[in-house]
Image (cartoon, grey):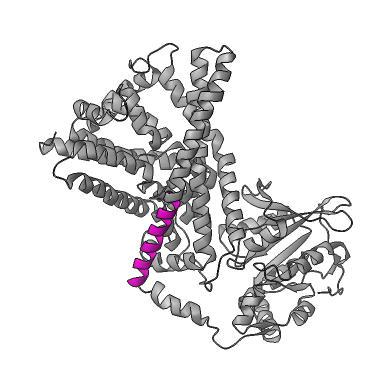
Amino acid sequence: MPAITQGCHTSGSAAALPGGVRQVALIGMPNTGKSTLYNKLTGGRAHVANWPGLTVDLLRGELPSDAFGNDYQLVDLPGIHDLKGSSEDEAIVRRYLATAPPDLIVLVINTSRAATQLRLALELRATGLPFIVALNMSDEAARFGVKVNAVRLSEDLQVPVVPISARSGRGVPDLLDQIHRLEATTFPPPARLEPDALDARLQALSAACVQAPHGLIDRLSHRIDRFLLHPAVGVLAFLVVMLAMFQAIYAIGTPLQELLGTAADAVETRLLLPLLQSLRLSPFLVHLATDGLWLGLTTVVSFMPIIFLFYLMISLIEDSGYLARSAFLMDGFMHWLGMDGRSFVLQIMGFGCNVPAIMGTRVIRDRPRRLLSMLVIPFSLCQARLAVFVFMAGAFFVRPWWAAGLVVFGFYVMSFVAAVLTALLFKHVYRGREGFVLELPPYRTPSLDTMLQRAWQQMVNFFFTTRQFIVIGVIAVWLLNNLPPGVDPLSGLSLSGMIGRTFQPLLGPIGMNPALTVSLIFGFVAKEILLGAMAVIYATSQAGLGGALVQAITPLQAVSFMMFTLLYTPCLSTVAVQWQESRSRVFVLVSLAWSFTLAWVMALLTYQGGLLLGLG
């Protein structure tokens, strides 16, 4: 679409120098298909970068060069509703435009919602920044009977307007061509608009350029929503969907984790150990490299299949339009807890693994509510803790036949209680806005290509942002168990044994002996290695661990141990992603302090209460 050359502002910021890289920013409201368009334009080649002055990670990728060899970089900004809004994402976009104004903005608009989303175009017009409009989902709009006069809209806004369908690729080459014509395009000067004048301008612009049937209704979505948004049937359907997601993620992910574990063991045995021995290193350094550094790296890698599958499923339910409906369905209950419906979805997903569920809080745009969700999610009883509980309940509660199952179910209930208690206590500390804008998009068939690219990007991002923290943590715990040099890790004379004895006055009242205390230290690294660590501490195989524990501790101590394991910090990976996502040392310390405090208090009540009742 040819640009109107009226006005005197040509494109170009400080970055737009001859031979330099042109910066292009994607802006749009949620559910406009912005991420799909980003992947279409960049081919999925992207990396996460922290922008100076923003303290936030933004996705950026390379666009194809133009005919003159000029390079272009595309930055994907968070979805926003208003340039003047109060949400964290809207503040991020404002800071970005103020501190690093791009050479060009591509405003992505859902064509079906153009009558309201054009407000963002008028706000950009008022800034004087160069932008073009991409009318996305134009094929879907035609199905709803919505028509937008792109020529008239271009004339009124005095900027290029390009109808596209990011999902099918239709019109995307025209959009890329318009981006490449950046240097030859003249943009109008700022159009100062007061709020009242902007509203009036939006109405006149929509009336002139947008034709839509009265009471726009997607009949297919409306019929499906009669069931999926029903107070009873909808909740049941949601639980079924979540269960199916868990089954899919772990039915595929667990064998992949085991395969990676087997491969890591083979590499260690056949390659790493012979290499280290050939260097004639001391046994201490060999074990430090294998049981410290190598174990830390493989711990990070073991999460990657779950992270990939988790985001694949999140993309499926989000891009299909179901995630917004799940959030809407549970919003009333979660609002009482100071959160919103999206937090409930992520809380349920945390029963699979806390790490990807915390990463998933990125869909929550209000920072206080996001922090509250990150504080609550670790209390979900994840698969790793479940394995510990199933093992110990099976060892200590053999009769009657239903006792072990009842114990495990009781910890699921306790997990829910801890989450609700935490939300109620901290909702006044992390107070979000009274409400959040939630648009129910029509049901769509997700793009498999987009889903795979998003899952891959998040998996790679997880590896590069958490590996250092986890590896250092694993090495630190190994050193605690093997220093001073030459000490027997089982003798109780190691640093970890000293720590166990040091903390005995604190943990003794909850039934922990020094061996259990050291086990909890290992469990802080990862609950997946807790049972193995206990087998090492009790000098037995994991197969014989159940019998050894029954001889060493009482059933009441076992229940107290499980209570503490449920409530204290799940693992180093959880701490790492909390740090990564919150970017707040204070928040991470609050989370650690609260989880340890709650774990100790509940274990104390369990153990001492049991003694008072004669259950010891």
Picture coordinates of residue 86, whole percent (x, y): 57, 62
Q: From this viewpoint, which residue is outermost toward the left?
A: 614
As drawn, 309 above or below 36: above
From the viewer's perspective, tell me whether residue 248 is left or right of residue 92. Answer: left
The quarter of the rendered structure image containing the C terminus is: top left
Residue in the foreground of this view, choosing between 40 and 5:
40
The answer, for residue 365, to whether it is visible in the render is no
**Quick check: is 238 in the magenta stretch?**
yes
Please report the bounds of the magenta region as a residue range: 232-250
From the viewer's perspective, tell me whether residue 578 is left or right of residue 427. Answer: right
Residue in the foreground of this view, choosing between 384 and 24:
384
Residue in the foreground of this view, choosing between 287 and 271:
271
The quarter of the rendered structure image containing the N terminus is: bottom right
User: Residue 547 sits in which quadrant?
Assistant: top left
Picture coordinates of residue 548, whole percent (x, y): 24, 26
**Most common secondary structure along the magenta stretch:** helix
Picture coordinates of residue 389, whole percent (x, y): 29, 41
- What is the tally of numbered marks visible in this picture? 0
**Quick check: is 73 in the magenta stretch?**
no
Q: Residue at x 29, y 28 (%)?
A: 516
As drawn, 208 above or below 281: below
Q: From this viewpoint, which residue is outermost toward the bottom?
A: 214
As drawn, 392 above or below 70: above
Residue in the foreground of this view, choosing between 370 and 535:
535
The answer, for residue 349, to whether it is visible in the render is yes
Q: Residue at x 54, y 28 (%)?
A: 267
Picture coordinates of residue 84, whole percent (x, y): 62, 65
